Amino acid sequence: MPARLPAIALTFALSTSTAYAQSCGGSFSSFVGGLKQEAVERGHDSATVDRFFASARQDNAVLKADRAQGVFQMPFVDFSRRLISQGRIDKGKSMGQKYDAIFDRIENEYGISRGVLLAFWAFETDYGSFQGDFNTANALITLAHDCRRPELFRPQIFAALELYEKGAFDPARTTGAWAGEIGMVQMLPADILENGMDGDGDGKVSLKTSAADALMSGGKMLSSLGWRKGEPWLQEITLPAEFDWSKTGLNHATSSNDWHAMGVRARSGNLTSGLQAAIILPQGRKGPAFIAYPNFNVYFEWNQSFTYVLTAAYFATRLEGGQVYNAGNPDTGLSGAQMKDLQNKLAARGYDVGKVDGILGARTREAVQDIQTKLGLPADAWPTPALLGKL
């Protein structure tokens, strides 16, 4: 899910009183009452507000889905092989041809290569075939009431209310993903308000039924998030055997020209000259290796899971004819329980690893790389049972 706070939602949050902005938990009916009061104070018609919230219900299935994201504990090779099939590649190429004119328009207007949006379309809804059956309004209200990430979801409720006032949202019937995203490329209500596009020219923005609308809206959103027109995002590379592994990681970007001087080579073609770039080793120095250009960072505005982002970016290259990555022979990684143990041990040594969740995220990777350096180990940011044993 796009776990972030869109610009329009941030505006909502900043304009909300501290009491409202921090409100979560407690009686669900009282919570909904508070939302209604706030909506009226924002200037919404009270009768419209009553109609919007009339069917509001807490959805425990949403909370269950929010807590059950263990798939992101999978290492990149396993995760990517699970999501990418020949069938998805073939269908992606077919959909690219079917909507060729739309993809050409997106590339001309926003400079976003078709593989990028095709990959999101595939992963989010399998090219629109399953867009989620959770009631969107109830999902957003449930997640805002839950105290885990209210700052993300509370503003989305008021964005959905605004869509309702425009006739573009039905609180009783609009459905989507468990986290409140709607349509073929799964956009949150605030993103729809900000970036919704009428791609097919029928005068409406229909992200659930119009591929043209969904793709154009997704393209505009990526552009608004900082996508750099016409630039690459990811490329597979080879590295010298004696490479300085401590220089790898998203927090160690440098010029692609400098990487070339250090012996980094594209596995196919050439590195793009003159761009800042980082070396990614998702499973350490013995596994796949990629160079990530500035556009790769935009992916994290769509989804904050490193494994998902890398898989989506890599899949985009495959949809445009790229080769299958060299999986190598990575050292055995850690189980979810072992990863939590590692995170606790690193936290005890003063490292900020974020939430102890068993997921190898950015902060855990940086901490692993630092402790590897201190222990005299190859600093490739890939935690192994041997490293855990040394701690």
Image (cartoon, grey):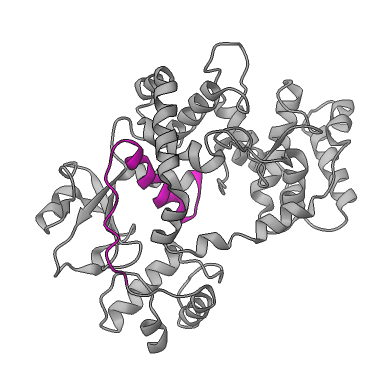
Q: Is residue 97 above or below residue 28?
A: above
Report the residue that reaches farthest toward the bottom: 390
Q: Report the quarter where the C terminus lies.
A: bottom left
User: Residue drawn 48% across and 70% down?
Assistant: 353
Relative placement, left or right, of 78 versus 49 is: left
Residue 357: x %, y % from top left: 56, 69
Q: Is residue 295 above or below residue 263?
A: above
Report the residue that reaches farthest toward the top: 202
Snapshot quadrant of residue 377: bottom left
The total number of labels drawn is 0
User: Residue drawn 35% across and 61% down?
Assistant: 282
Relative placement, left or right, of 273 versus 348 is: left
User: Residue drawn 37% across and 20% down?
Assistant: 104
Given residues 347 and 322, the one toward you in this image is 322
Given residues 210 and 343, the one toward you in this image is 210
Give the residues drawn in magenta, as a range: 302-330
Question: Does the segment drawn in magenta span residue 197?
Answer: no
Question: Does the segment drawn in magenta span residue 305?
Answer: yes
Residue 18: x %, y % from top left: 72, 50
Residue 112: x %, y % from top left: 37, 30
Snapshot quadrant of residue 67: bottom right
Residue 70: x %, y % from top left: 57, 63
Can residue 306 be seen from the camera position used here? no
Relative placement, left or right, of 111 versus 167 is: left
Can residue 110 be seen from the camera position used here? yes
Relative placement, left or right, of 142 versus 51 is: left
